[in-house]
């Protein structure tokens, strides 16, 4: 008894591999949609502040951070905020050792809510609350 070979379909392994790829891609896309614009903005702002701290330490010089309602200056470089986001005014600097000049809390908000950036004295590390 000879088996009849069908060549017009996919094997079970091929179908499972395609299904796995689709699932992995859909998980990555759905996780990005859960973050609000404000959360993404605060993460960028935090990254810029850490960059200024590292720049101060590496270049052994003071770097300034100035945050206004609709824009920020990072060591003189202008960064404009999205129109829907507004922040409190805040100014500080990192010294040549990378230490922050003062402990701060920055509050930013949009239509969906409010988030805070908390700067710790000493280490100068920053976190989102």
Image (cartoon, rainbow, N blue to C red):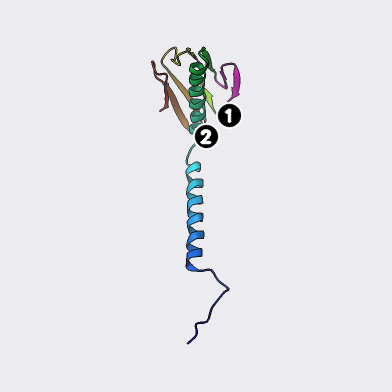
Which residue is pictured at 42% across the width and 13% down the height? Answer: 102
| Image position, residue 34 (x, y; %) | 47, 41
Q: Outermost residue toward the bottom?
A: 1
Is label 2 in a helix, a strand or a loop? helix
**Mark 2 and mark 1: span between their CA atoms?**
9 Å
Residue 115 visible? The answer is yes
Task: State the quadrant of the C terminus.
Answer: top left
Q: Quadrant of residue 77?
A: top right
| Image position, residue 13 (x, y; %) | 48, 65
Q: Are marks 2 and 1 in contact (CB under 8 Å)?
A: yes
For label 2, the residue is 37
Image position of 84 with respect to 75: above or below? below
Which residue is pictured at 50% across the width and 16% down the height? Answer: 56
| Image position, residue 30 (x, y; %) | 49, 46
Q: Nearer the viewer, residue 57 or 22?
A: 57
For marks 2 and 1, the one nearer the N-term is: 2
For label 1, the residue is 82
Is label 1 in a helix, a strand or a loop? loop
- Within 10 Å of disc 2 (Cα), the crowding (few <14, some 14-19, many 20+) is some
Residue 71 included in the magenta stretch of the image: yes
Which residue is pictured at 44% across the width and 12% down the height? Answer: 101
Q: Nearer the viewer, residue 38 or 79?
A: 79
Residue 88 visible? The answer is no
- Within 10 Å of disc 1 (Cα), the crowding (few <14, some 14-19, many 20+) is few
Q: Nearer the viewer, residue 12 or 36?
A: 12
What range is drawn magenta here?
Answer: 68-83
Disc ID at residue 50: none
| Image position, residue 45 (x, y; %) | 51, 26
């Amino acid at each position: 008894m000879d088996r009849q070979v069908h060549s017009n379909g996919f094997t079970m392994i091929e179908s499972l591999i395609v299904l796995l790829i689709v699932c992995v891609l859909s998980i990555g896309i759905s996780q990005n949609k859960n973050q609000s614009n404000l959360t993404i903005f605060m993460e960028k702002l935090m990254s810029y502040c850490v960059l200024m701290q590292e720049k101060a330490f590496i270049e052994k010089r003071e770097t300034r951070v100035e945050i206004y309602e609709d824009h920020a200056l990072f060591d003189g470089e202008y960064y404009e905020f999205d129109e829907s986001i507004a922040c409190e005014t805040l100014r500080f600097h990192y010294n040549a050792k990378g230490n922050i000049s003062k402990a701060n809390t920055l509050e930013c908000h949009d239509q969906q809510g409010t988030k805070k950036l908390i700067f710790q004295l000493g280490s100068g590390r920053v976190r989102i609350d």
